[in-house]
Image (cartoon, rainbow, N blue to C red):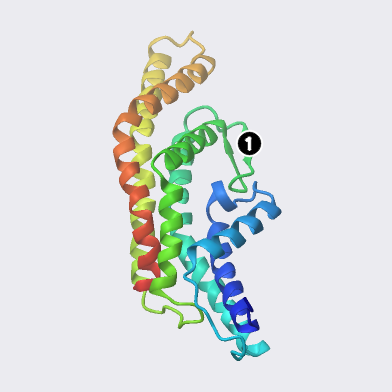
Amino acid sequence: MTISVAQAQLYFLAFTRIMAILIHLPMLGGQSIPNQVRIGLGLVLALILVPWQPLAPDAEALGFIVYSIAVAKEIIIGTLVGFAIDLVFGMIQIAGATMGLGSGFESGRIFNPALGDAGSAFDQLFLILLMLFFIVFDGHHIVLIAIQKTFQVLPLNGPLPFNGLDVVISTTGQLIAAGVHLALPVMTALIMTDLTLGLLARVAPQVQVYFLGLPVKVTVALLSLTLMFSVMLPFLRDVFRALGDNMLRFIQG
């Protein structure tokens, strides 16, 4: 079978869009994944997910300038679709950082290579647990299916979507608010702990409240996080299952 230059150009456009999306998913294309693995995965997914568009061997190839513009458009589309993934994991980071503020872990920060950001041990524990739940709820399969559907919504070398800005803004606001709401149970428990320690300091000044408060707040934070998972998991399942629809809405408008 002869593959024309035009056919190879279409394949590379598909590969460009897929890679622009995958780099936003920590488990498949995050900074902790070697470049060789990311590129190999992108090449394989481009063969599997993109509908084959057979062209004649003598089909005319795109010129350098036109093809460069087409590649730039695929990068923009992939970045816009991947932004929906960034919002979900950004919501998780917001919740973890907000809960970690008063937990006693904030004094020591750890670098997370998966997201390229630093946070407290509490943040990292929360983020790792929710990344595991993302896989358990088949979030990675949802993302792959959504990537395949983007080629149906916006064919290769098609026009850029300019009518989805309102959807992007509203979804961003909703997920930021959801991140804060996720943190409220732990924050409330920590505030109540601070109030209790403050009253104890007034009632019994001889008690070293500062040194007593550190292990108490750590224990309260971990216990409240454990208890809130039973309420949080159904909400997270709905968020992860809606991720694919949000990825497509960002380019549908």
Q: Position of residue 190 (x, y in %)?
A: 40, 27
Residue 142 vs 62, above or below: the answer is: above
- 183 and 195: which one is in front? 183
Q: Residue at x 64, y 79 (%)?
A: 2
The kind of residue tagged 1 is: Ile
Q: Position of residue 133 (x, y in %)?
A: 42, 38
Instruction: Please tell me in which quadrant of the rendered image residue 146 appears.
Output: bottom left
Residue 236 vs 78, above or below: the answer is: above
Numbered marks: total: 1
Can the viewer see residue 168 in this picture? no
Can the viewer see residue 238 in this picture? yes
Q: Position of residue 225 (x, y in %)?
A: 40, 28
Residue 201 vs residue 42: left or right? left
Q: Residue at x 35, y 42 (%)?
A: 236
- 239 and 185: which one is in front? 239
Query: Could you classify mark 1 by the number of other residues whose Cα lies within 10 Å: few (under 14), some (14-19), or many (20 or more)?
Result: some
Q: Residue at x 34, y 67 (%)?
A: 167
Quadrant holding the C terminus: bottom left
Q: Which residue is mark 1?
A: 110
Residue 65 vs residue 174: left or right? right
Instruction: Please tell me in which quadrant of the rendered image residue 185 appears.
Output: top left
Among all residues in the image, which is located at the extreme front? 1
Quadrant holding the N terminus: bottom right
Q: Position of residue 95 (x, y in %)?
A: 43, 42
Q: Residue at x 51, y 32 (%)?
A: 125
Q: Secondary structure at mark 1?
A: strand
